[in-house]
Image: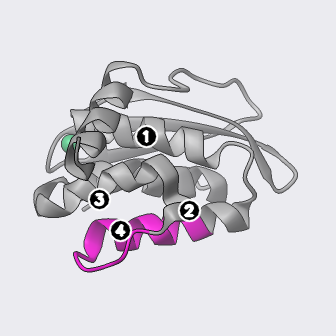
Amino acid sequence: MDLKDLYRDVILDHNKTPRHRGTLPPPARVAQGHNPLCGDQLTVYALMDGDILKEVRFEGSGCAISVASASLMTEAVKGKSQAEIAHLFKAIHDLLTRADAPIPASLGKLAALSGVREFPARVKCASLCWHTLNQALAGADAPITTE
Ligand code: ZN
């Protein structure tokens, strides 16, 4: 099995069996994201404990990439500080948008998203959940859109 097969398996697995799908009651912060290019709709719930993201959930409907990316994201960010999440966000942004960027081992399963590089139209599908989480962490109310 080469790396591409591995990546595809991770995406398929997280699309079929999304982790942390659902909602969280207040005082969890909520943000909504929309990717009009593809039609992906996402709502992210984030419960903070001080500076730590204690619990995270997402719901919505979208393509396989958007759902798998959100599922992978929730696994990666739960229990992390805002600074650690900001660092991951930057690493993911580089991973998705810079075709020549090396893939840091620290990304773990998130590296599966590097497969999206070959499909520029899908980059916004993969990054939607991260932008939406950022919005939730910022405590902003306005829905975000990738456009
Ligand atoms: Zn999509």
Tell me if mark 2 has few (under 14), some (14-19) or many (20+) residues whose alpha carbon lies within 10 angstroms of its own. few
Q: Amino acid at mark 3?
A: Ser
Does the magenta-highlighted stretch encompass residue 89? yes
Residue 30: horizontal and vertical position, in percent?
Answer: 59, 39
Q: Are marks 4 and 3 in contact (CB under 8 Å)?
A: yes
Q: Which residues are magenta?
A: 87-103
Give the camera-side residue of 119 and 138: 119
Q: Which mark is residue 95?
A: 4
Q: Position of residue 2 (x, y in %)?
A: 22, 48
Circle 1 or circle 2, nearest the eye: 2
130 w.r.t. 95: above or below = above
Label 1 and label 3: CA atoms lie apart by 14 Å
Residue under pointer 2: 106
Label 1 near label 4: C-beta < 8 Å?
no
Q: Is mark 4 within 8 Å of ligand 1?
A: no
The residue that appears at 54% across and 56% down in the rendered structure is 135
Labels 4 and 1: the sequence-earlier one: 1
Q: Amino acid at mark 1?
A: Ala
N-term mark: 1 or 2: 1
The dot on residue 70 is 1
- Which residue sits at x=24%, y=33%? 64
The answer to whether the residue labelled 4 contacts the one labelled 2, judged by CB atoms less than 8 Å apart, is: no
Which labelled disc corresponds to residue 48? none
Q: Which residue is mark 3?
A: 114
Closer to the chain start, of discs 1 and 3, is: 1
Q: Amino acid at mark 4?
A: Leu
